[in-house]
Image (tube, rainbow, N blue to C red):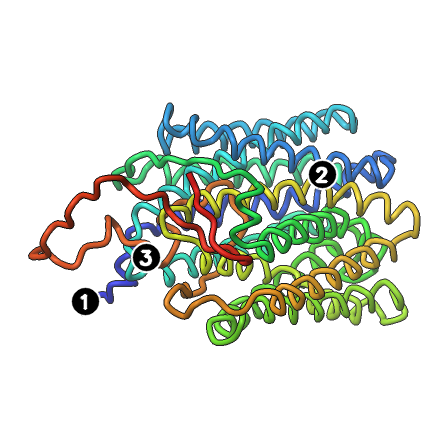
Amino acid sequence: MPLSPSMSDTRNVFVLIVAVMILQIAGGLIGVLTPLGLESMDTPPQAIGLIAALYAAGFMLGAWLAPRALATFGHIRLFAAASAMNAVSVLSLSLVHDAIFWAPVRVVMGVAFAFSFTSIESWLGSAVPEKSRGNVMGIYHTGAKLSLMIGPFFVAGLSPLDTRAYTWAALFLSLALVPVCLTRKEQPPLPERKSMPLRALYQVAPAAVLGALIAGVVNTGTQSLLPIYFESFKLGGGGTTAAAIASAAAWMGGLILQWPAGRLSDRIERRLVIAILGAVSALAALTIAIFGTGLGEVGVVVVLGLWGAGALSFYSLCVAHAIDRTPKVLIPQVMSGLLFVWAVGSIIGPLMSGFAMRAAGRSGLFGLAGLLLIVLAVIMVWRVRSKPVADEDKMAEWSPVLPTPLASVKLDPRMSESSEKTGPEAPPEPAPEESPEPEVEVEGGTESKV
């Protein structure tokens, strides 16, 4: 029985999806180990937040350097080198238990993860045709989230500074090399990436920019200190097991609601859906902040899943909203710009969360998240009232998007494999005397871009 086109296209990039899933198992595992390990070394919360911010800074630096590195070394070699850098880095954390040493190592790991995802994302974007891109990318992101949920359970029951925990992470980082290095698929042409000034990006879609910033602040800040919040819980035996359960609950919430929220945003104004998600997650965060363990340990985990359902789902809707208002020729710049904004927020978030926990105790973590998510909901409602819905003919079909270091033009479901043509018999268009500048529809009018 012949495979459907979407299944065939998925099979063509299956090794890349498997590589990312293995890589994300290590990522989820490291995300739990790092804050717990730092706390075991008596590192204060604000310093833990600072080290998390340094990782985000390294990720942003890697995203900026990655296109040039990709053009120099190619997809496979860059991915292999980055995975090796990460494996060596995580093993070094188990050898030296000193927060001052961990800080620069986390910067290196941020750069390496950015290189790894750039290699895979650009390869996927080039290899998957337009007609099945949504389905394939949906499988890709679903697999990545499942891996992030699974990862922490490999260290359940181990001490945060147990060498075996870091060996598990290095094992998966090394294992991710196998499917990529042994693939017989031809590497795609190297992608190009041009930057867009942040002011111009904001003029294209203010709501998307503000939403991406808040996503970076809230999600990265909360998740970076989440293991510390749950370490004292007795759930599953406490310690790393309780932290793994909490992390999985948050990601499970986002996994369950992401597709329904995205499909709903194809039918009604996306910013209203983002506002609803923000309000739901704000309510959940404030409930945890106010009642805390009074809900019972299982109750807190359930409410945390509700927080994840909203907070971990709205970033992809912000991206889709920006695409709705962007000319096709500028989509790569806009998506890369949103990534940069998200990375800025991911640097600020852990710092703010660390200070919130120091000032208000554990309730400060979710109290800050709840307030910022209320701000998100208010902003989205305000933008809807300020600017009506985009034209129907410019609406892009939604597909889930995770913040990754390179958003290629091929990732957008509206982009074809080549320039738009009416068919092989279509007559060529006459060349104009002067090439007009592309016009960018912005939420407040139309701006000419050079």
Q: Residue at x 49, y 39 (%)?
A: 196
Residue at the location (49% across, 43% down)? 336
Of circles 3 and 1, which is in front? 3
Q: Could you tell me the amino acid type at mark 2? A: Ala
In the picture, the disc for residue 52 is 2
Q: On the image, which quarter does residue 205 sit in?
A: bottom right
Tell me where residue 116 appears, x and y as whole percent: 48, 37
Of the pair 203 and 263, the residue shown nearer to us: 203
Image height check: is 251 above or below 36? Answer: below
The location of residue 101, given as percent across then percent down, is 74, 24
Residue at the image position 54 percent from the left and 62 percent from the top: 317
The answer to which of 139 and 448 lies nearer the viewer is: 448
Dot 3 crowding, Cα within 10 Å, few <14, some 14–19, many 20+: many
Of callouts 3 and 2, which one flags the residue occurring earlier in the amino acid sequence?
Answer: 3
- What's the distance in space between the residues labelled 3 and 1, CA to CA? 14 Å
Q: Quadrant of the N terminus?
A: bottom left
Residue at image coords 59%, 55%: 150
Do residues under tags 3 and 1 come within 8 Å of each other at their CB atoms?
Answer: no
Q: Which residue is mark 1?
A: 2
| Chain-order first, disc 2 or disc 1 | 1
| Earlier residue among tags 3 and 1 | 1
Give the residue at the far left of this rendering. 425
Q: Is residue 212 left or right of residue 307?
A: left
- Disc 1 crowd, CA 10 A, few/some/many (<14, 14-19, 20+): few
The amino acid on which the numbered mark 3 sits, given as a three-letter code, is: Thr
Residue that label 3 marks: 10
